[in-house]
């Protein structure tokens, strides 16, 4: 048995696939240095053979086993390369997606764990395994996922979310004998963990999470240092409210009105009055379009403006705070820390 099954679909995002395989390869190379067992994996597709990825790239795959059997591997599904509601709906109706969703459902219902990033999370939805789960996906697709799967909680702020018990770590101690190392390296994972991640490049964050939970911090940190990957916890700093609206003219207008009013943003009540509706009705429209409350939308606009000022200007944090409607920098620092786990100085390093 292997630790990971990388399930690749036609048209998948090539960077996500390559990132997955590169990080597993690095983990295998660095495992002895980290005093842990090396991860093992297989690359599969529903049909086997060459799989055509985006940009004309091809990948040789094995056929995903169709017979029911015990599979203790964590299935990893890289992003499908779908970026809009229409492309997702078309993609999920394809024969390969239907077969993949059926296989995923069997795997999870049999106690198996799966991990998906970006639009691949929608394949988990099609498989019917997200009900009652807390998940994330690409931030601008989060409202769509919430509408398609109202029985789960979609948290667009987070970069990676693990719902369910963590897998058994396969790390070993240098003092342990070889037979014990082999036993630990194939320990069964705890059943049915669903791990989801944000946009395509969040595949790196997803892989670091899997390596950390299944093989220990030492190996994950070693891979991170070798490949110069800085693990992130939130998508919040990257959210653009107007894009998050996903075609809602009302929410786009709200975001523009709030931004134009800075540093004196309107209250929720004032926004509701301006658009001739109650605060409850306004909140319902905003929640449906973005997955967040009206107040959270206002704060997202303020955070986006603050991030831009921190990146593109030499303004002090106090001046930036004043420019987005705070009397001092403490409130801004608190907001940034709450939604992104970062601090203003980290925004500056991203320039």
Image: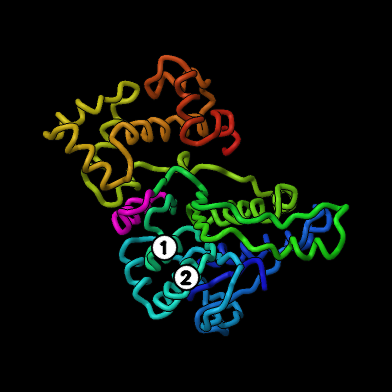
What element does badge 1 sit on?
Answer: loop
Q: With respect to residue 144, does 268 lie above or below?
A: above
Name the residue at 44% across, 42% down.
Answer: 157
Q: Is residue 125 left or right of residue 216?
A: left
Quadrant of the image containing the C terminus? top right
Residue 104: mark: 2
Residue 27 in magenta stretch: no
Nearest the eye: 41 or 309? 41
The residue lying furthest to the top in this view is 327
> Answer yes or no: do the residues labelled 1 and 2 have beta carbons within 8 Å?
yes
Q: Is residue 80 left or right of residue 288?
A: right
Q: With respect to residue 213, does 82 lie above or below?
A: below
Give the x, y percent position of residue 41.
66, 70
Q: Could you tell me how far apart the alpha carbons at marks 1 and 2 are, in whole angstroms?
A: 8 Å
Badge 2 local density, few (<14 within 10 Å), some, or many (20+)?
many
Give the x, y percent position of residue 109.
46, 67
- Closer to the chain start, of discs 1 and 2, is 2
Badge 1 local density, few (<14 within 10 Å), some, or many (20+)?
many
* Residue placed under numbered mark 1 in the picture: 129
Residue 274: mark: none
Q: With respect to residue 88, does 272 lie above or below?
A: above
Q: Which residues are magenta?
A: 139-153
């Amino acid at each position: 048995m292997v630790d990971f099954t990388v399930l690749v679909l036609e048209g998948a995002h090539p960077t996500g696939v390559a990132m997955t395989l590169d990080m597993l390869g690095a983990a295998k190379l660095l495992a002895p240095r980290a005093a842990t067992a090396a991860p093992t994996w297989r690359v599969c597709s529903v049909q086997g053979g060459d799989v055509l990825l985006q940009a004309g790239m091809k990948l040789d795959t094995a056929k995903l086993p169709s017979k029911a059997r015990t599979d203790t591997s964590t299935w990893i599904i890289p992003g499908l390369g779908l970026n809009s509601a229409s492309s997702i709906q078309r993609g999920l109706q394809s024969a390969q997606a239907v077969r993949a969703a059926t296989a995923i459902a069997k795997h999870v219902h049999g106690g198996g764990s799966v991990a998906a990033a970006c639009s691949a999370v929608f394949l988990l939805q099609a498989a019917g395994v997200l009900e009652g789960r807390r998940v994330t996906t690409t931030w601008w697709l989060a409202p769509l996922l919430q509408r398609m799967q109202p029985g789960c909680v979609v948290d667009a702020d987070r970069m990676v979310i693990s719902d369910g018990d963590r897998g058994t770590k396969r790390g070993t101690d240098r003092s342990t004998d070889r037979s014990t190392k082999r036993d630990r390296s194939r320990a069964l994972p705890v059943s049915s963990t669903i791990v989801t991640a944000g946009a395509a490049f969040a595949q790196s964050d997803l892989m670091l999470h899997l390596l950390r939970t299944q093989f220990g911090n030492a190996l994950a940190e070693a891979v991170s240092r070798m490949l110069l990957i800085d693990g992130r916890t939130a998508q919040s700093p990257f959210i653009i409210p107007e894009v998050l609206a996903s075609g809602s003219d009302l929410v786009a207008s709200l975001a523009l009105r709030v931004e134009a009013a800075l540093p004196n943003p309107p209250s929720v009540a004032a926004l509701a009055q301006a658009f001739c509706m109650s605060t409850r009705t306004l909140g319902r429209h905003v929640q449906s379009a973005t997955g967040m409350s009206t107040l959270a939308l206002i704060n997202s606009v303020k955070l986006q403006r603050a991030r831009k000022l921190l990146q593109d200007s030499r303004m002090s944090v106090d001046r930036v705070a004043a420019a987005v409607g705070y009397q001092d920098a403490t409130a801004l620092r608190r907001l940034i820390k709450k939604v992104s786990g970062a601090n203003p100085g980290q925004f500056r390093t991203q320039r």
